[in-house]
Image (cartoon, rainbow, N blue to C red):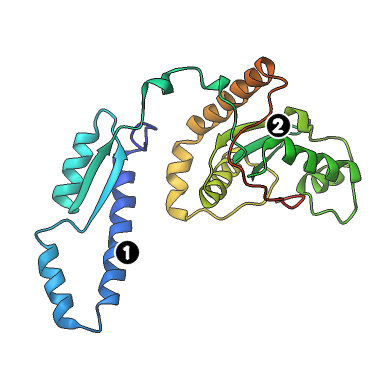
Amino acid sequence: MLLKSNYPLKEIEKLIKQTCQEFKSNKNKSNDKNDDIAGQIKDKNNDEFICSLALPYVPGMEVLKRRLEKKLKIKLFFSYPYKLQSQFNQSLKVPSKSVIYQIPCSCKETYVGQTKVGIDNRMKQHSKAINDNENNSNSEMVKHFQEKKFQCLFDTNDAFIIEEKKDYWKRRAKEAIYSIISESVNTHDEINAAWTPILHKAKRLIQRKIESARENYNKYKELKPNEKQDGDSDTEKDSILS
């Protein structure tokens, strides 16, 4: 995935090496109570792989595989996630309820959020907060246009899905990445500093992905205006603003 996204090979190797060093460090700490066993494990690891990874195959991965296995003792397996149906127009796909979304503001700022109740239900929550316009509102969108003296407004009708992701923590991570790239007004989780150079180099690529997601979602709304969302069956009620 990283190679396909044009990430530098040196950056990929650096991050993988750092992760493996942390893995080995934690492993050694857990074995400090038994020096004899720790010594045996260390000797054994000289000839065996210290860990394994599975990455989607793309052309050029063979070079990375050789470097990982020979230099870093990391066994790399290839996966092939792309099937025939992935080649068809994904804009016709009914969205999942677990999504990362974006809402543009009339002043060109953006809001990025994540939810598992579906984008329609989430927009109703945002609209209520905007219409209530309470002075002590926790809504970052309300705070934004209050600070702008009501000269701008977030229109929830222009919201679109950037990506679907059922796993809660992966949604939070993606929300943070898209927020950083879009320089959005919402708060988000911190991203490890090791990812900063990669995000910087991939900024245009991610921006194009966001724009493509907006276009595809607008096509979906035009083609299926009355279709209800389908996805995971959770009925979690998000707070008014995340």
Dot 1: what SS? helix
Answer with mark 2 or mark 1, whichever residue precedes in sequence. 1
Q: Give left or right: position of 106 versus 110.
A: right
Residue at image x 26%, y 28%?
59
Find disc 2 in the rendering and name its residue.
159
Q: Quadrant of residue 57?
A: top left
Q: Quadrant location of residue 233?
A: top right
- Name the one closer to the observer, 149 or 138: 138
Note whether 213 is above or below 191 in the view shown: above
Query: What number is the disc on residue 132?
Result: none
201 left or right, relative to 208:
left
83 w.r.t. 126: above or below: above
Report x, y in % for residue 107. Answer: 77, 32
Q: Amino acid at mark 2?
A: Ala
The amino acid type of the residue labelled 1 equals Glu
| Of the pair 215 and 91, the residue shown nearer to us | 91
Q: Is residue 5 above or below residue 128?
A: above
Of discs 2 and 1, which sits in the foreground? 2
**x 12%, y 73%: residue:** 40
In the image, what residue occupies the spot 33% across and 38% down? 8
Query: Where residue 70 sits in the image (x, y, percent)?
Result: 13, 49
Q: Position of residue 139 (x, y in %)?
A: 79, 49
Residue at the image point whose x is 17% and y is 56% from the top? 49
Q: Nearer the viewer, residue 29 or 12?
A: 29
In front here: 108 or 211?
211
The residues bearing labels 2 and 1 have C-alpha atoms spaced at a distance of 40 Å
Q: Mark 1 highlights which residue?
A: 22
Q: Secondary structure at mark 2?
A: loop
